[in-house]
Amino acid sequence: MTLSALGIFSAAGAGGVAFASDYELIESVILTGSQASITFSSLGTYSSTYKHLQIRMIARDARAVDINNAFLRFNGDTTTNYSYHLLVGNGSTVTSDAGVSNDSAVAGGSVGASGTANAFAPSVVDILDPFSTTKNKTVRSLTGQNSSASTIRLWSSNWRSTASVTSINIYPSSSTGFVSGSRFSLYGLK
Amino acid sequence: MPTDTYVALANITLGSSASSVTFSSIPATFRDLVVVYSGNITASSTLGAYRFNSDTGSNYTGVYTANASSGTRATTSSDFYFQGTTGISTAIIQVMDYSATDKHKTSLVRSGNLAEWVQMYANRWANTAAITSMTLLPIDATSFAPTSTWAAGTTFALYGIAS
């Protein structure tokens, strides 16, 4: 069976009235050159609009490794207020890891400069209740790299702060930064 | 200014079994594609697989991790697959930057089925061409050759996410 022509569902109904979307693009950053990190700022503007946030990213960086991590910080907090858990498979073994006093959460992955040419690492990052002032913040990320080395990873991170999120900074685990073609898109969910 | 983003592009519910399903003429106007699958394959010892732009060459590599009550499993593959086999299974396939021409196409998959497996995959299509079609088909779990059919009632939904 083939759909040779895709039908676009407008959800408009017979009356032509469009329903508002509950999943909206807030901002997208597409790198055309190297950049040390990216920051989504002024997010307090959306605290009454969205319930959750999602970051969809695909990244490569200049560090001379096959596989790299991309880290995430809220509101410029560089102190050890973050924890994480990790489940990872590398094609031969499944392992887990955890950290309780880290200076960042985990956004996802990145293919390093030693990785297969043209390979990038995608990540889907869910940030739950980021604007709550009664809860610590939880981040869940599915990421994978299929390059000269390959992994599939499921991360869960925690920021021990009840402050409403106003900014998100994402950076690779090196000082060389993300490279051209990397893309970071922030979405709000109502 | 926020913009409407998550758009349903196509929905397929099989009225009868089918050897494959293809989404074609995929517009380049979105950033990511998401495929939501729920269904069944009519034969056992099979897997669900997907291919891009009718490419049947050796251009696919994947890594996956799975868990069942019998233990965990990790392996690499030369095909893109998600759990199918007999018994209802579900999967969400995220194809990132599908229309970009400066990178290979990498997708993430989370899936599970009644045979107790929960799985996640990272798959890379070694091609910088924009994806214009996506074919989903059952394959033999040993040879990875096309085999069997999707069962009647199996559903495939394609969404575009704007950026």
Image (cartoon, rainbow, N blue to C red):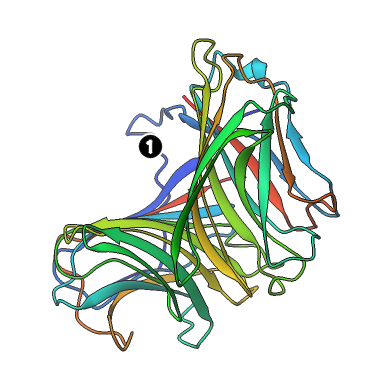
Estimate the x, y position of residue A138 in percent, counting from the top left: 50, 29
Residue lying at the far top of the rendered structure:
A134
Instruction: Please state which of residues A100 and B105 is positioned toward the viewer in this rendering.
Output: A100
- Residue at figure coordinates x 19%, y 81% from the top left: B148
Residue B120 position within the rendered picture, expressed as x and y whole percent measured from the top left:
40, 59
Foreground residue among A172 and B32? A172
Above or below: residue B17 compared with residue A10: below
The vertical placement of A63 against A46, above or below, is below
Q: Is residue B156 visible?
A: no
Q: Residue at x 50, y 78 (%)?
A: B60
Q: Secondary structure at mark 1?
A: loop
Subunit that carries the residue with mark 1: A
Horizontally, is B34 left or right of A127 in the view? left
Give the total of numbered labels: 1
Q: Give the amino acid at mark 1.
A: Ala
- Residue B102 placement (x, y as % from top left): 72, 67
Tell me: residue A78, above or below residue A71: above
- What residue would you read off at disc 1? A11
Say left or right for B16 vs B76: left
- As rendered, which of B36 and A111 lies closer to the eye? A111
